[in-house]
């Protein structure tokens, strides 16, 4: 089974917690704080492995979580950072954030990698909060949570030449003749429901990868039939070989078949209209094929006079070698598309952006006799701070006062003893800008 689309969940490792600890050794008076920082959580990294060809592995494992960092230790020892989680993917994989539909990466070369979920920072131990005014702080931070997201993986076949055409026109037979690939072949529609790849040895030291892509029907650009599952793979090919049943064995007109398939390609991606194309007039060993070919040439000349039409027969192998030579010549004349990051580095200036200033906005709502404070900055701070010490509470109170939350609560009518809620935490408002559980 060829799996070319998968939805998975990834999460970077959480950072380790910092600790509160003091140096207590004989003959060392006033040892001071000695709580170390927590280690950083591991990243989830996707790396291209050219030995993979499908997304089959993601059918069985859909959750990837990196390890969290170790907690800080006493004697000023920092916790160890966690190892990154490396996830192998095949070349040609597009990584998309499900929520935003942003393309995070389009990886095509062996060894390319991208971080899809960053690990959280480790929390600071109490050695980080020591000051001349407070040389022995009882204050530490929790580790930051790792980034998490759902992502969609889409695999586009990495082939030089793609065989397109209506079902049962002989694409699979042609691939089996020119390569060692063994695609399923049968006398019914949609024999091929997944792409087949084969390496074609043209001779003279030249070779290329050919893909027999699933049959296409009218309306595919809107998802009819195999629809987008097919068209996704055509985008990767550098040369299109359009296989046409010139014998009209199913009662269809060869020119109409050719026109409909080209319309579907253009409607899906306008760039495909200009992709180099060769028409392989197949089944020339069948009766009336020669007559149909002459009529086909006349009609195509009125629309695309530059289009190459090569008569072949996959069954007798007549004209097949000439088709391969022409495809190889076309590939030699087309430069390989540079990778996305190469274009950026060579043709554009790099742009460095400063980190955005933390949003200090807040909203205060009234609920019965209590006030509800909604502030992303304060909620993040409360997740990080270990609010089990008087010093942590005072630090939170100073931050809220600095942000202007105190003054706004007073304007709204807060008095001593008024309940204030932030997330899951509840405080009593005390005049003098202090908060207590």
Image (cartoon, grey):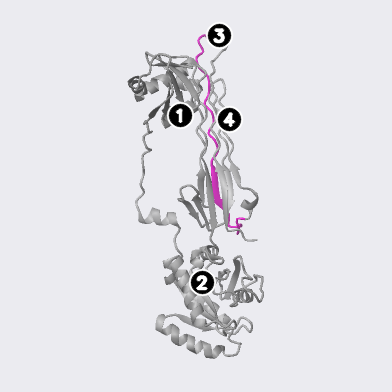
Cα distance in 3D space between marks 2 and 3: 87 Å
Residue 235: tell me if it is visible: no
- Judged by its main secondary structure, the magenta piece is loop
Q: Secondary structure at mark 1?
A: helix
Cα distance in 3D space between marks 1 and 3: 43 Å
Q: Which residue is mark 1?
A: 379
Q: Residue at the location (61% across, 51% down)?
A: 58
Cα distance in 3D space between marks 4 and 1: 24 Å
Range of residues picked out in magenta = 26-55
Cα distance in 3D space between marks 2 and 4: 57 Å
Tag 2: Cα neighbours inside 10 Å, few (<14), some, or many (≥20)? some
Report x, y in % for residue 32. 50, 14
On screen, residue 287 versus residue 255, left or right, reads: right
* Mark 1 or mark 2, whichever is nearer to me: 2
Q: Which residue is mark 3?
A: 27
* Mark 1 or mark 3, whichever is nearer to me: 1
Is 49 colored magenta in this rendering? yes
Q: Which residue is mark 4?
A: 70
Identify the image quadrant of residue 396.
Answer: top left
The mark nearer the N terminus, 4 or 1, is 4
The mark nearer the N terminus, 2 or 4, is 4
* Mark 4 or mark 1, whichever is nearer to me: 1
Which corner quadrant holds the N terminus? bottom right
């Amino acid at each position: 089974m060829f799996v070319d689309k998968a939805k998975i969940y990834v999460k970077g490792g959480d950072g380790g917690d910092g600790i509160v600890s003091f140096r207590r050794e004989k003959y060392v008076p006033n040892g001071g704080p000695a709580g170390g920082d927590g280690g950083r959580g591991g990243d989830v990294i996707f790396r291209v492995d050219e030995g993979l060809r499908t997304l089959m592995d993601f059918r069985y494992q859909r959750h990837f979580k990196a390890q969290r960092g170790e907690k800080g230790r006493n004697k000023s020892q920092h916790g160890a950072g966690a190892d990154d989680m490396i996830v192998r993917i095949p070349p040609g994989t597009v990584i998309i954030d499900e929520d935003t539909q942003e393309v995070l990466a389009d990886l095509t070369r062996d060894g390319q990698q991208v971080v899809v979920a960053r690990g959280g920072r480790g929390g600071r131990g109490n050695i980080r909060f020591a000051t001349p005014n407070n040389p022995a702080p009882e204050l530490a931070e929790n580790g930051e949570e790792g980034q998490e997201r759902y992502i969609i993986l889409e695999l586009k076949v990495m082939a030089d030449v793609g065989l397109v055409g209506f079902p049962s026109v002989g694409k699979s037979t042609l691939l089996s003749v020119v390569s060692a690939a063994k695609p399923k072949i049968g006398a019914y529609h949609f024999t091929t429901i997944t792409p087949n790849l084969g390496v074609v040895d043209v001779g003279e030291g030249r070779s290329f990868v050919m893909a027999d892509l699933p049959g296409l029907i009218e309306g595919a650009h809107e998802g009819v039939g195999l629809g987008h599952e097919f068209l996704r793979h055509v985008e990767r090919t550098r040369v299109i070989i359009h296989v046409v049943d010139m014998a009209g064995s199913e009662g269809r007109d060869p020119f109409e078949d050719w026109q409909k398939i080209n319309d579907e390609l253009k409607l899906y991606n306008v760039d495909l209209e200009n992709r180099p194309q060769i028409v392989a007039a197949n089944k020339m060993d069948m009766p009336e094929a020669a007559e149909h070919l002459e009529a086909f040439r006349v009609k195509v000349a009125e629309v695309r006079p530059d289009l190459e039409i090569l008569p072949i027969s996959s069954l007798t192998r007549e004209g097949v070698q000439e088709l391969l030579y022409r495809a190889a010549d076309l590939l030699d004349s087309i430069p390989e598309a540079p990778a996305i990051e190469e274009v950026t580095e060579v043709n554009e200036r790099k742009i460095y952006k400063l980190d955005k200033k933390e949003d200090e906005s807040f909203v205060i709502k009234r609920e019965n006799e209590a006030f509800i404070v909604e502030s992303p900055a304060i909620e993040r701070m409360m997740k990080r701070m270990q609010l089990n010490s008087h010093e942590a509470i005072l630090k939170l109170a100073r931050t809220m006062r600095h942000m202007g939350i105190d003054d706004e609560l007073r304007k709204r009518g807060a008095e001593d003893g008024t309940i204030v809620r932030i997330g899951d935490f509840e405080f009593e408002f005390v005049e003098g800008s202090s908060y207590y559980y």
